[in-house]
Image (cartoon, rainbow, N blue to C red):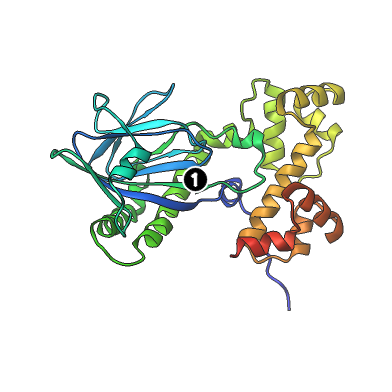
Amino acid sequence: MTRLVSPEPDFVSEALRTLSVRSTVFCLSELRTPWAFRVEATRVAKFHLVLEGSALLLCDAEASVALGAGDLVVLPHGAAHTVADNNASPATPLERLLAEHPLDGGLRLRNGGTGALTRLLCGGFALAEGFPDSTLAGLPATLRIHADEVSATGWLEPVLATLKAEAEGDLPGASAIVAKIADVFLAQALRSWLSSKGRARLAGALIHDRPIDKATQALCDQPLEAWTLDRLARHVGLSRTALSTKFREQIGESPMRYLTKVRLSLAAARLSTGELTIHEIARFAGYQDNASFSKAFKREFGRTPGAYRDDARV
Protein backbone atom coordinates (compact mmCIF):
# COMPACT_ATOMS: atom_id res chain seq x y z
CA MET A 1 0.00 0.00 0.00
CA THR A 2 1.30 3.44 -0.92
CA ARG A 3 1.62 5.73 2.05
CA LEU A 4 0.17 9.20 1.60
CA VAL A 5 2.60 11.91 2.58
CA SER A 6 1.16 15.18 3.79
CA PRO A 7 2.52 18.35 2.17
CA GLU A 8 5.06 20.27 4.18
CA PRO A 9 3.35 22.77 6.49
CA ASP A 10 3.88 26.45 5.86
CA PHE A 11 6.02 28.66 8.12
CA VAL A 12 3.05 30.01 10.08
CA SER A 13 1.66 26.53 10.76
CA GLU A 14 5.03 25.31 12.01
CA ALA A 15 5.49 28.39 14.19
CA LEU A 16 2.04 27.90 15.73
CA ARG A 17 2.92 24.30 16.56
CA THR A 18 6.15 25.41 18.17
CA LEU A 19 4.62 28.32 20.06
CA SER A 20 2.43 26.35 22.45
CA VAL A 21 -0.91 27.99 23.21
CA ARG A 22 -1.97 25.80 26.09
CA SER A 23 -3.73 28.32 28.25
CA THR A 24 -4.69 28.55 31.90
CA VAL A 25 -7.58 30.75 32.98
CA PHE A 26 -6.74 33.03 35.91
CA CYS A 27 -10.18 34.59 36.25
CA LEU A 28 -13.40 35.58 34.52
CA SER A 29 -13.71 39.18 35.68
CA GLU A 30 -16.94 41.13 36.01
CA LEU A 31 -15.92 44.74 36.56
CA ARG A 32 -17.99 47.92 36.90
CA THR A 33 -16.54 51.39 36.60
CA PRO A 34 -14.47 52.68 38.21
CA TRP A 35 -12.00 49.81 38.22
CA ALA A 36 -8.32 49.07 37.54
CA PHE A 37 -5.86 46.34 38.44
CA ARG A 38 -2.09 46.03 38.16
CA VAL A 39 -0.25 42.86 37.06
CA GLU A 40 3.42 42.63 37.96
CA ALA A 41 6.05 41.26 35.59
CA THR A 42 6.64 37.50 35.63
CA ARG A 43 7.99 34.98 33.14
CA VAL A 44 4.48 33.69 32.45
CA ALA A 45 2.98 34.87 29.15
CA LYS A 46 -0.40 36.51 29.73
CA PHE A 47 -3.55 37.47 27.84
CA HIS A 48 -6.75 39.46 28.31
CA LEU A 49 -9.86 38.94 26.19
CA VAL A 50 -12.71 41.45 26.38
CA LEU A 51 -16.01 39.56 26.41
CA GLU A 52 -18.18 42.61 26.95
CA GLY A 53 -17.69 46.35 27.39
CA SER A 54 -14.29 48.04 27.03
CA ALA A 55 -10.92 48.34 28.72
CA LEU A 56 -7.60 50.14 28.49
CA LEU A 57 -4.26 48.34 28.65
CA LEU A 58 -1.37 50.37 30.05
CA CYS A 59 1.98 48.66 29.58
CA ASP A 60 5.23 50.14 30.87
CA ALA A 61 7.14 52.04 28.15
CA GLU A 62 4.36 51.29 25.65
CA ALA A 63 1.47 53.38 24.35
CA SER A 64 -1.91 52.62 25.92
CA VAL A 65 -4.11 50.16 24.02
CA ALA A 66 -7.90 50.63 23.87
CA LEU A 67 -9.81 47.34 23.82
CA GLY A 68 -13.41 46.64 22.87
CA ALA A 69 -15.65 43.58 22.93
CA GLY A 70 -13.96 40.69 21.11
CA ASP A 71 -10.49 42.26 21.25
CA LEU A 72 -7.59 40.21 22.58
CA VAL A 73 -4.25 41.43 23.89
CA VAL A 74 -1.32 39.07 24.47
CA LEU A 75 1.81 39.82 26.53
CA PRO A 76 4.22 37.04 25.44
CA HIS A 77 7.01 38.06 27.83
CA GLY A 78 4.80 38.56 30.89
CA ALA A 79 5.48 42.31 31.01
CA ALA A 80 4.11 44.40 33.88
CA HIS A 81 0.88 46.16 32.94
CA THR A 82 -2.35 47.72 34.15
CA VAL A 83 -5.85 47.02 32.87
CA ALA A 84 -8.45 49.69 33.65
CA ASP A 85 -11.64 51.42 32.61
CA ASN A 86 -9.58 54.58 32.01
CA ASN A 87 -6.12 55.92 32.79
CA ALA A 88 -7.33 57.94 35.79
CA SER A 89 -8.64 55.04 37.91
CA PRO A 90 -6.27 53.99 40.73
CA ALA A 91 -5.01 50.46 40.19
CA THR A 92 -5.04 47.71 42.81
CA PRO A 93 -2.41 44.95 42.54
CA LEU A 94 -4.12 41.88 41.13
CA GLU A 95 -2.74 39.62 43.87
CA ARG A 96 -4.29 41.85 46.53
CA LEU A 97 -7.54 42.05 44.60
CA LEU A 98 -7.77 38.27 44.45
CA ALA A 99 -6.95 37.97 48.15
CA GLU A 100 -9.64 40.47 49.13
CA HIS A 101 -12.22 39.11 46.67
CA PRO A 102 -11.74 35.31 46.48
CA LEU A 103 -12.83 33.68 43.24
CA ASP A 104 -15.94 31.53 43.23
CA GLY A 105 -16.07 27.99 41.85
CA GLY A 106 -16.27 29.29 38.28
CA LEU A 107 -13.17 31.47 38.74
CA ARG A 108 -15.32 34.60 38.61
CA LEU A 109 -14.03 37.85 40.06
CA ARG A 110 -16.46 40.69 40.73
CA ASN A 111 -15.11 44.14 41.57
CA GLY A 112 -15.40 47.87 40.96
CA GLY A 113 -18.13 50.41 41.37
CA THR A 114 -21.69 50.65 40.06
CA GLY A 115 -21.05 51.96 36.55
CA ALA A 116 -20.75 50.40 33.10
CA LEU A 117 -20.00 46.66 32.97
CA THR A 118 -16.90 45.07 31.46
CA ARG A 119 -16.29 41.33 31.36
CA LEU A 120 -12.74 40.08 30.87
CA LEU A 121 -11.19 36.66 30.46
CA CYS A 122 -7.68 36.82 31.93
CA GLY A 123 -5.11 34.05 31.85
CA GLY A 124 -1.67 32.81 30.96
CA PHE A 125 -0.18 30.41 28.45
CA ALA A 126 2.98 28.42 27.94
CA LEU A 127 5.49 28.68 25.14
CA ALA A 128 7.09 25.42 24.06
CA GLU A 129 10.41 24.45 25.62
CA GLY A 130 13.47 24.93 23.49
CA PHE A 131 12.14 27.61 21.18
CA PRO A 132 15.28 29.55 20.14
CA ASP A 133 15.85 32.55 22.39
CA SER A 134 16.75 34.74 19.44
CA THR A 135 13.41 34.10 17.74
CA LEU A 136 11.41 34.17 20.97
CA ALA A 137 12.83 37.64 21.54
CA GLY A 138 11.15 38.71 18.31
CA LEU A 139 7.68 38.52 19.81
CA PRO A 140 6.51 42.04 20.74
CA ALA A 141 5.86 43.17 24.31
CA THR A 142 2.16 43.45 23.48
CA LEU A 143 0.28 41.79 20.65
CA ARG A 144 -3.28 42.86 19.95
CA ILE A 145 -5.86 41.32 17.67
CA HIS A 146 -8.99 43.30 16.84
CA ALA A 147 -12.39 41.66 16.80
CA ASP A 148 -12.93 42.79 13.21
CA GLU A 149 -9.82 40.87 12.09
CA VAL A 150 -11.61 37.57 12.68
CA SER A 151 -15.28 38.58 12.45
CA ALA A 152 -15.35 37.78 8.72
CA THR A 153 -14.78 34.10 9.49
CA GLY A 154 -18.16 33.91 11.22
CA TRP A 155 -16.97 32.09 14.33
CA LEU A 156 -16.21 35.07 16.57
CA GLU A 157 -19.73 36.01 17.66
CA PRO A 158 -20.93 32.51 18.63
CA VAL A 159 -17.66 31.79 20.46
CA LEU A 160 -17.90 35.07 22.36
CA ALA A 161 -21.50 34.22 23.20
CA THR A 162 -20.35 30.86 24.58
CA LEU A 163 -17.65 32.50 26.68
CA LYS A 164 -20.11 35.06 28.05
CA ALA A 165 -22.55 32.27 28.92
CA GLU A 166 -19.79 30.44 30.82
CA ALA A 167 -18.85 33.67 32.60
CA GLU A 168 -22.44 34.28 33.66
CA GLY A 169 -23.30 30.68 34.50
CA ASP A 170 -22.31 28.35 37.31
CA LEU A 171 -21.77 25.01 35.58
CA PRO A 172 -19.09 22.50 36.63
CA GLY A 173 -16.00 22.46 34.42
CA ALA A 174 -16.47 26.03 33.20
CA SER A 175 -12.81 26.96 33.67
CA ALA A 176 -11.62 23.99 31.58
CA ILE A 177 -14.05 24.78 28.76
CA VAL A 178 -13.09 28.44 28.77
CA ALA A 179 -9.37 27.58 28.67
CA LYS A 180 -9.87 25.42 25.57
CA ILE A 181 -11.79 28.18 23.82
CA ALA A 182 -9.11 30.69 24.81
CA ASP A 183 -6.57 28.53 22.97
CA VAL A 184 -8.42 29.29 19.74
CA PHE A 185 -8.22 33.05 20.30
CA LEU A 186 -4.53 32.85 21.20
CA ALA A 187 -3.72 30.79 18.11
CA GLN A 188 -5.63 33.29 15.98
CA ALA A 189 -3.72 36.21 17.51
CA LEU A 190 -0.36 34.59 16.84
CA ARG A 191 -1.39 33.60 13.31
CA SER A 192 -2.54 37.13 12.55
CA TRP A 193 0.75 38.59 13.74
CA LEU A 194 2.93 35.92 12.12
CA SER A 195 1.12 36.30 8.80
CA SER A 196 1.97 39.98 8.63
CA LYS A 197 4.91 41.73 10.28
CA GLY A 198 5.69 38.87 12.63
CA ARG A 199 7.09 36.55 9.96
CA ALA A 200 10.09 38.71 9.27
CA ARG A 201 10.45 39.86 12.86
CA LEU A 202 10.55 36.35 14.29
CA ALA A 203 13.17 35.31 11.78
CA GLY A 204 15.35 38.37 12.32
CA ALA A 205 14.66 39.11 15.97
CA LEU A 206 16.43 42.23 17.19
CA ILE A 207 18.86 42.13 14.26
CA HIS A 208 20.02 45.38 12.71
CA ASP A 209 22.52 43.97 10.22
CA ARG A 210 20.74 43.20 6.92
CA PRO A 211 22.92 40.24 5.84
CA ILE A 212 22.46 38.58 9.26
CA ASP A 213 18.74 39.36 9.17
CA LYS A 214 18.61 37.75 5.72
CA ALA A 215 20.55 34.73 6.98
CA THR A 216 18.23 34.06 9.94
CA GLN A 217 15.17 34.48 7.72
CA ALA A 218 16.59 31.97 5.22
CA LEU A 219 17.30 29.42 7.96
CA CYS A 220 13.84 29.85 9.53
CA ASP A 221 11.92 29.94 6.26
CA GLN A 222 13.81 27.03 4.66
CA PRO A 223 15.13 24.89 7.53
CA LEU A 224 15.06 21.71 5.44
CA GLU A 225 17.40 23.07 2.77
CA ALA A 226 20.90 21.59 2.65
CA TRP A 227 22.51 24.69 4.11
CA THR A 228 26.26 24.87 4.52
CA LEU A 229 28.26 27.82 5.76
CA ASP A 230 29.53 28.45 2.22
CA ARG A 231 26.04 28.35 0.70
CA LEU A 232 24.60 30.65 3.36
CA ALA A 233 27.50 33.08 2.97
CA ARG A 234 26.90 33.27 -0.79
CA HIS A 235 23.16 33.73 -0.19
CA VAL A 236 23.72 36.83 1.97
CA GLY A 237 26.76 38.20 0.13
CA LEU A 238 29.36 37.76 2.84
CA SER A 239 32.55 35.75 3.19
CA ARG A 240 32.51 32.66 5.43
CA THR A 241 34.55 34.45 8.05
CA ALA A 242 32.45 37.63 8.03
CA LEU A 243 29.22 35.65 8.26
CA SER A 244 30.47 33.51 11.15
CA THR A 245 31.79 36.51 13.06
CA LYS A 246 28.78 38.78 12.57
CA PHE A 247 26.28 35.98 13.18
CA ARG A 248 27.90 34.97 16.46
CA GLU A 249 28.12 38.61 17.58
CA GLN A 250 24.43 39.28 16.98
CA ILE A 251 22.80 35.90 17.56
CA GLY A 252 25.16 34.45 20.14
CA GLU A 253 25.88 31.20 18.29
CA SER A 254 27.10 29.94 14.93
CA PRO A 255 24.78 29.79 11.89
CA MET A 256 24.83 25.98 11.83
CA ARG A 257 24.08 25.76 15.57
CA TYR A 258 21.18 28.17 15.05
CA LEU A 259 19.89 26.00 12.19
CA THR A 260 20.12 22.90 14.39
CA LYS A 261 18.01 24.58 17.09
CA VAL A 262 15.40 25.64 14.53
CA ARG A 263 15.19 22.11 13.12
CA LEU A 264 15.00 20.51 16.57
CA SER A 265 12.30 22.97 17.65
CA LEU A 266 10.23 22.02 14.61
CA ALA A 267 10.89 18.35 15.37
CA ALA A 268 9.66 18.89 18.93
CA ALA A 269 6.50 20.48 17.58
CA ARG A 270 5.86 17.46 15.37
CA LEU A 271 6.51 15.09 18.26
CA SER A 272 3.88 16.98 20.27
CA THR A 273 1.20 17.34 17.62
CA GLY A 274 1.72 14.85 14.79
CA GLU A 275 1.55 11.13 14.16
CA LEU A 276 4.80 10.72 12.23
CA THR A 277 7.23 8.13 13.54
CA ILE A 278 10.38 9.22 15.32
CA HIS A 279 12.38 7.98 12.33
CA GLU A 280 10.31 10.15 9.97
CA ILE A 281 10.73 13.17 12.23
CA ALA A 282 14.48 12.50 12.44
CA ARG A 283 14.71 12.58 8.64
CA PHE A 284 12.54 15.71 8.59
CA ALA A 285 15.01 17.37 10.97
CA GLY A 286 17.94 16.48 8.73
CA TYR A 287 19.28 13.41 10.58
CA GLN A 288 20.02 10.19 8.72
CA ASP A 289 19.57 7.88 11.72
CA ASN A 290 17.60 7.78 14.95
CA ALA A 291 20.65 7.54 17.18
CA SER A 292 22.20 10.86 16.10
CA PHE A 293 18.78 12.55 16.19
CA SER A 294 18.05 11.21 19.68
CA LYS A 295 21.45 12.34 20.96
CA ALA A 296 21.04 15.87 19.57
CA PHE A 297 17.45 16.10 20.77
CA LYS A 298 18.31 14.98 24.30
CA ARG A 299 21.18 17.47 24.44
CA GLU A 300 18.75 20.26 23.47
CA PHE A 301 15.64 19.26 25.47
CA GLY A 302 17.01 17.11 28.28
CA ARG A 303 15.09 13.97 27.29
CA THR A 304 14.76 11.59 24.39
CA PRO A 305 12.29 12.17 21.53
CA GLY A 306 10.13 9.30 22.80
CA ALA A 307 10.00 10.69 26.34
CA TYR A 308 9.25 14.17 24.97
CA ARG A 309 6.31 12.80 22.94
CA ASP A 310 4.99 10.89 25.96
CA ASP A 311 5.16 14.02 28.14
CA ALA A 312 3.34 16.08 25.51
CA ARG A 313 0.47 13.60 25.44
CA VAL A 314 -0.15 13.72 29.20
Q: Quadrant of the C terminus?
A: bottom right
Asked which quadrant contains residue 230, the reply is top right
User: Residue lying furthest front in this view?
Assistant: 100
Total numbered labels: 1
* Element carrying mark 1: helix
Q: Quadrant of the N terminus?
A: bottom right
Left or right of 32? Residue 267 is right
Question: On screen, 111 above or below 63?
Answer: below
Pick the front one: 230 or 181: 181
Pick the front one: 90 or 272: 90
Dot 1 amino acid type: Arg
Task: Mark yes or no: residue 55 visible.
Answer: yes
Q: Mark 1 highlights which residue? A: 191
Name the residue located 68 percent from the left edge and 48 percent from the top edge. Answer: 265
Pick the front one: 251 or 149: 251
Question: On screen, 60 above or below 106?
Answer: above
Asked which quadrant contains residue 228, the reply is top right
Name the residue located 13 percent from the left edge and 38 percent from the top edge. Answer: 115
Question: In the rendering, at what x and y percent does residue 237 appear?
Answer: 78, 24
Question: In the rendering, at what x and y percent does residue 131 appear?
Answer: 65, 43
